[in-house]
Image (spheres, rainbow, N blue to C red):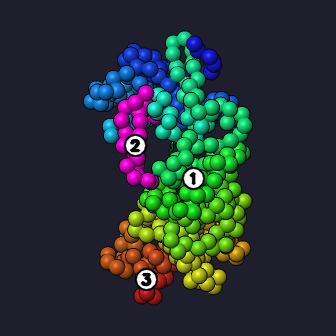
Amino acid sequence: MPDIQFTLPPTICQISRLIWQQEGKAFLVGGPVRDLLLNLPCPDWDIAVDFGVRENRLLVERKMAHLLQKTANHLKGKFVFHRQFLTGTVTLPDEKKIDICHTRRESYLKPATLPRVAPAAIDDDLVRRDFTINALALELTPDGTTLIDPFQGRQDLNHRLVRILHPKSFIDDPTRIFRAIRFAIRLDYRIESGTLYLLRAAVKERYPALLTPERILYELRCILAESAALKMVEALLRENVLKSCWTHWHLDRTLLSGLKKLARQGATPKELFCYLLSFLPINEKFPITTEERDTAWLLRHLNPLRRRLMRAKRASTIYHLLKPVPETLLLIMMKLEKRAIQKKCRLFYHQLRFIKPETSAASLINCGVPSGPEIGRLLRRLHNARLDKKVHTREEEIKLLKRWIGKGC
Ligand code: ATP
């Protein structure tokens, strides 16, 4: 019997109809169900499908591919299908994403590795989840919706508790340690006492060290994108989670004070992430962008640049010192450095980087400069003159240029 009525977005209703047309069962699963029950806005929609042909993996894959194709056509979007995991994502024209997966069972061959996946019923799909408050499904039928709540997740929502489903949960997947902290702080819940005991035991046994840097960094990125990121990092440090990820890693106390200062000044998740990264034992296996790697490296070796910036008087000197600095680092420096340095970084960021000479190489040739390296040298001198406000217009540039050429320089 349908038991709860929710108002769902039209796209979700349309996808449900496509699933029913293929004789599948449609479910909303995980986060969206939790958020609907809490009356919170739901950023992502996760749909699970059961086509009822679980023993025939090939047929499941074919039906999933067909559903994703039809959904993408219907909603004028695009889709990707990860056959191995039976999961797909449809991206709508407004870039919103909807995950559509087949209900599945997971088995872990070794702790902290990615699981093997096989089609299974909704109950098996919920058993593999992280916490009771996320092990919820809402079956969508033409007559309404029915809540599926095998682990009393709704009760834990009422009691404001984050609770794992089984004692080996953190060992199977230590990323759940990060997730438990993230959800508890985001929702202002408590980690249930048995769960907290097992979390601490897994940390003590250093299970997080079995995770790949990719999985650790994914969790850290998720945390730093939250509005309560700082409290979450504090909890990670308090519970020694970061320490348990890397041998010989020691907490540098300036990490928290720096993050606090950045967060107070409205730093973006990317800035917070790069700052945190600069305290971690980065190696070539870290899946980070070149900008993130350079920013983290420069943050650790900032003193020479600091000294030169302190001495720099001319705008052109400031320009050349800061031009090679990645934008994220510049934004961090504008928030963390001494006032005098902040001011120079702001000058570069808001003004200097946009200043260019108006004279082109072609005009120089017109003025009689032979083509060759001399052109580049004169353009750089003109650029500096413009930065240092020695010239303000194209006419002044040409006048200065003629003077230089006349002098033979
Ligand atoms: P958010 O609001 O942050 O998106 P969410 O609950 O939707 O929260 P996701 O990371 O999108 O979180 O995961 C979707 C669902 O997949 C979760 O609700 C949970 O049921 C399940 N899940 C995600 N990660 C894990 C994990 N490491 N172990 C078990 N289940 C997980």
Q: Nearer the viewer, residue 368 or 374?
A: 374
> Tag 1: Cα neighbours inside 10 Å, few (<14), some, or many (≥20)?
many
Q: Position of residue 340 (x, y in %)?
A: 70, 76
* Image height of 235 relative to 74, above or below: below
Magenta stretch holds residue 21: no
Residue 285: x, y in percent? 40, 65
Q: Which mark is residue 405?
A: 3
Q: What kind of element bears circle 1? A: helix
Which numbered disc flags the more N-terminal residue, 2 or 3? 2
Magenta stretch contains residue 105: yes
Label 2: state its secondary structure: strand
Cα distance in 3D space between marks 1 and 3: 68 Å
- Start and end of the magenta stretch? 95-121
From the viewer's perspective, is residue 88 above or below residue 233?
A: above
Residue with the mark numbered 1:
177
Measured along the vertical axis of the image, is residue 384 above or below residue 104? below
Q: Report the disc number at residue 107.
A: 2
